[in-house]
Image (cartoon, rainbow, N blue to C red):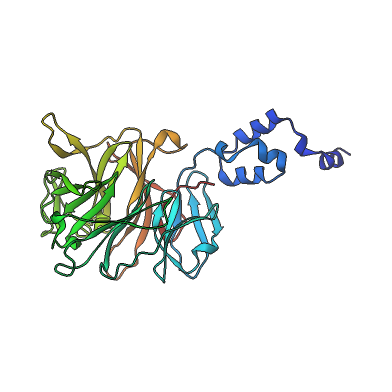
Amino acid sequence: MEAKEALERDWSSLLPEVLNLIAGNLTEITDFVRFRAVCTAWSSSATIADLPLQFPWILEERHCYEDDLRFYSIPFGKIYNIHAAKSLGKMFMRPSDKYIQLFSMTGQRSLLNPLNDHEIPLPAYDCDDYPCIKGPWKNRMGVHMVCYGPPGYQKYPKLVSCQFDQDKWCELVLGLDYANCDLGDCNLFYLNGMLFNVDSDTGVTKVTDVATNTLAYVIPPVEGYLGKNTEYTQVNGDIRRVFEQYDSSAECIMDASGDILRVFRYYDSSAGWCHYSFVIHRLDVNESGSVFWVKVDNIGNHALFLGMDGGFVLQANDFAGIKRNCIYFSMKMFAGICEAPLYRVEKIDIETGAREQLPCPLKEPQGWFVPVL
């Protein structure tokens, strides 16, 4: 009799304060979605804005002919299979915070949130005269990239930028500072209206103010920089072998609540499998107004989420489970030319260097993704 009454009970008539109490204890995104799907009353009692910010998921690499995406949540130990029809036939450029950057065989670029199926198509850009691309970079304003050619092919490279609310690319021809230089030997980053050009040979960083197209700063190389003509660099007084020193994937420049951070990745393969570590510098200004990179071992309440190709910064106290002043890194390691790569996910304490391997059952972690409905 009691079981029959329970089946016949109208669960949609629960008091609002009871529904709010239940919803407030649903910290995992799928539980929250199921709760809101019960009925209209339950859905209206918990808006999407009530969902706590989720610890970033790890995205698994997949073939472009597949339209199912696999993610893994470290705090909940769950694998999520998300059907994303709009990703079919498209390659990942990289996960980028709340979106995945996609690139189709026809050259169309877009940003996709597979959880709500929201896609931001980026306008087509004809770069026949500029066959090579640095970037693209995404921030909260839009997507940006530098198009250029080999030395002598194109005298002045272009920075092309697309705001999320626009339907066309805005172009800016870079100034004389970039004329006839081989941008293939430079690491370029666009951030907060500034284009950072790190010369791989000298280690000097030139910063161009995009609004005025003028050189704003020339920043000396970091202490101990040995240049691109060697396979080694000096880190904390030690000589370390550099991984992909010629590639911008070995370093990135990021905004941490107004602080500009330069993160450099290096590895030590003396123990067999290559062992990744990081050096972080912050852009600083002294009393005389000189701009320079200063090495730091504390980034405050921030945490870095890095893959093999870039990443993003989060405020640790906004997300349950994120530890401040840490790097969360999804890495691919090689033991030798003939051996298959090994994938690992680690958390590194920036101040102490302490490392913790995090669980991840995915075969090929591609990078980090912030799940947002």
In the picture, measured across the screen, residue 65 lies left or right of residue 289, that is right
In the picture, measured across the screen, residue 175 lies left or right of residue 23, that is left
Residue sitting farthest toward the right: 1
User: Horizontal and vertical percent for residue 248?
Assistant: 25, 56
Q: Quadrant of residue 364?
A: bottom left
Residue 203 showing in the rendered view: yes
User: Horizontal and vertical percent for residue 323?
Assistant: 39, 37
Taking depth in this image into account, of 335 and 189 the one nearest to the observer is 189
Note whether 268 is above or below 64 in the view shown: above
- Counting the numbered discs, the total is 0
Q: Quadrant of residue 151?
A: bottom left
Taking depth in this image into account, of 122 and 183 the one nearest to the observer is 122
Note whether 293 is above or below 133 in the view shown: above
Taking depth in this image into account, of 207 and 224 the one nearest to the observer is 207
Residue 267 showing in the rendered view: no
Classify the position of the N terminus by image quarter. Answer: top right
Q: Quadrant of residue 41?
A: top right
Note whether 324 is above or below 171 in the view shown: above
Taking depth in this image into account, of 138 and 306 the one nearest to the observer is 138
User: Horizontal and vertical percent for residue 227?
Assistant: 11, 54
Q: Residue at x 52, y 37 (%)?
A: 52
In the picture, measured across the screen, residue 334 lies left or right of residue 231, that is right
In the picture, measured across the screen, residue 336 lies left or right of residue 362, that is left
